[in-house]
Amino acid sequence: FQDVHVMIFIGFGFLMTFLRRYGFSSVGINMLLAAVAIQWAMLVSGYIHGHGGKVHIGVTNMLTADFAAAAVLITFGALLGKTSPLQLVVVCFLEIILFSVNEWIGLSLLEVVDVGGSMFVHAFGAYFGLAVSRMLYRKDVEEATKEGSVYHSDLFSMIGTIFLWLFWPSFNSALAVEDAQHRAVINTYLALAACCVVTFAVSALTDPNCKFDMVHVQNATLAGGVAVGTSADMMIGLHGALLIGSVAGALSVLGFKYITPFLASRLKIHDTCGVNNLHGMPAILAAIAGCIASVLADEDNYGYTLYRQFPARSPANETSPEFLHISQHMEISAGKGRTASEQASFQIAALAVTLIIAISGGAVVGLIVRFIPMDQPRGEALFEDSRHWHVPDDEENTQNTTGDALLTPRPAGKADLETGFNGH
């Protein structure tokens, strides 16, 4: 539990400190939103699942509340620097409700497997945030002069990257049990390692001077953890984990290089932290990998643990000879009697439902916070701490005199919109 908790408050928080004038808000508002989200998520989840009118609190509930907070913080990454604290708290409250409903549909109704939350946490948080960002779009965001990094702000952001990279195996394995938990740790460990190597390679290959881009290293090195999340506890093999991590790293770098500028210039979707590249697209890759792993899952590979790994594949009739035979070897509950291909179809259906709820819900929430007065920053207040924080005078003076000189170009924007994620 504590590994995941550190990821939420330190990993996500410091990952977003790359903005040169927005460090207080990146870490501070991250802490505020996470604290609000975990409390609200426990209540909403308790209401949805229902336990005789009582909300059960335990370590598992605390973990799932942290997962819900992660979705909110991923959304925060898409909105970083463009929204007020009040707007973000409102977004948090509404998003948690939709997040919990979507998770309930996927896990309880569709009965899919997503141990690392790639679909229900990463895809939902990313595309919900992008939809809100589109609804809040204004031309002055394109013209903002403070959306950039300096040497030390990028260094602080790398602290978040390292924490997330180290603890991601815990995130993907936290809710798994027995052998499945061991598989989740190993698969995530290998996917992250492969992703890191490929990220450095592709970052250099896509640069005219063959130099590494800190934006890519801060973010794309983590994409492997997202991409392997759905299939982390499945028997994908070492080669599968390495392949998924490698593809995720390349996909994320190319997203920062080409897709983020396209979204900003053509679709008017400003993605401050590049959450589409770190969370969105790798989560879709995760769903595809999970679908393939589900199709290939059979008793030859899993033995009777197949029906614990995929509960919906258990025989539907508790009195059937097949159910009685399996129950002699391990304790199972009646399922839906699905075949491997049927389970794979439900895995993809869960992704589709997630995207529909996230995008439509995000658009509605974006309209709400856009048209209700909530002190949304404009002009010079964009990407600026001083609107909501007491900022030391020496920092302001230092930034005013040296900030522009030290400004590090970030490869995404109108023509060169400055971005970089952070967020899970």
Image (tube, rainbow, N blue to C red):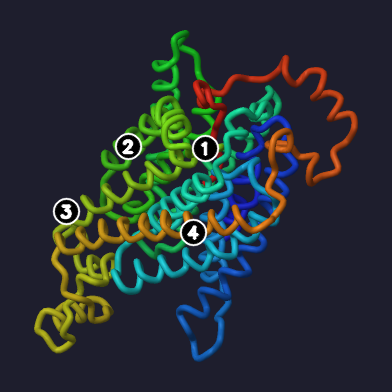
Cα separation, mark 3 vs mark 2, equals 18 Å
Amino acid tagged 2? Leu
- Which residue corresponds to the image point at 63% horizontal and 69% vertical from the top-left? 39
Query: Which quadrant does the N terminus fall into?
Result: bottom right
Q: Residue under circle 4?
A: 364
Q: Residue under circle 3?
A: 296
Q: Residue under circle 1?
A: 270
Q: Are marks 4 and 2 in contact (CB under 8 Å)?
A: no
Q: Residue under circle 2?
A: 242
Query: In the drawing, does residue 266 fall left or right of residue 380?
Result: left
Instruction: State the mark number for residue 16.
Output: none
* Label 3 packing within 10 angstroms: few (<14), some (14-19), many (20+): some
Residue 402 visible in this rendered orientation of the protein: yes
Cα separation, mark 4 vs mark 2, equals 39 Å
In primary-sequence order, the first of circles 4 and 2 is: 2
Cα separation, mark 1 vs mark 3, equals 39 Å
For numbered disc 4, what is the local secondary structure?
helix
Residue 189 drawn above or below residue 68: above
Query: In the drawing, does residue 17 fall left or right of residue 172?
Result: right
Amino acid tagged 1? His
In primary-sequence order, the first of circles 4 and 1 is: 1
Q: Position of residue 2 (x, y in %)?
A: 60, 58
- Quarter holding residue 327: bottom left
- Which residue corresponds to the image point at 45% horizontal and 32% vertical from the top-left? 260
